[in-house]
Image (spheres, rainbow, N blue to C red):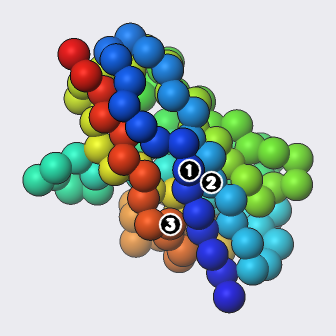
Amino acid sequence: QVQVIESGGGLVQAGGSLRLSCTASGQNFRSHTMGWFRQGSGKERDFVAAHTWNGKMTYYGDSVKGRFTIPRDDAGNTVYLQMNSLKPEDTAVYYCAVRLDYGLGDASAEYDYWGQGTQVTVSS
């Protein structure tokens, strides 16, 4: 049984930093892409970042480029979201997702397994 578990959300002031973690278990995900999405209150779920193990490529949404990074551990089953220079508009529930291939698409429908989400709140 595949499980995807996020942690690390919380409250932070604008300009601060926060690091989210996500671990996938139940099979070996080393050859698969892991990514992050977020959904603000009353908004659609948006792509944030993805990291594919194959070629170790990363891909970022326009709103987070230059501020967020998505490192991944050597075992391949844990991915992080390092968030710097946070803004109030980054406030959302952040979801970790895994897809059963190594594509770098930003559509949520392309991802097969999801975590329960972790709340990030950025105060002004």
x then y, percent, for residue 77: 77, 59
Calculate the distance from the C-alpha at mark 1 to the C-alpha at mark 3: 10 Å
Pointer 2: what residue? Answer: 22
Secondary structure found at label 1:
strand
In the image: residue 89, left or right of residue 75: left
Pointer 1: what residue? Answer: 7
Mark 3 and mark 1 in contact (Cβ < 8 Å)?
Answer: no
Q: Amino acid at mark 1?
A: Ser
**Classed neighbour count for the residue bearing mark 1: other residues with Cα under 10 Å, few (<14), some (14–19), many (≥20):** some
**Classed neighbour count for the residue bearing mark 3: other residues with Cα under 10 Å, few (<14), some (14–19), many (≥20):** some
At horizontal 40% and vertical 71% (from top left) the residue drawn is 109
Mark 2 and mark 3 in contact (Cβ < 8 Å)?
Answer: yes
Q: Amino acid at mark 3?
A: Gly
Choose the circle earlier in sequence order: 3 or 2.
2
In the image: residue 88, left or right of residue 12: left
x then y, percent, for residue 122: 30, 27
User: Closest to the observer: 102 or 78?
Assistant: 78
- The answer to which quarter of the image holds residue 48 is top left
Mark 2 and mark 1 in contact (Cβ < 8 Å)?
Answer: yes
Checking the image for residue 60, the label placed there is none
Pointer 3: what residue? Answer: 115
Q: How many marks?
A: 3
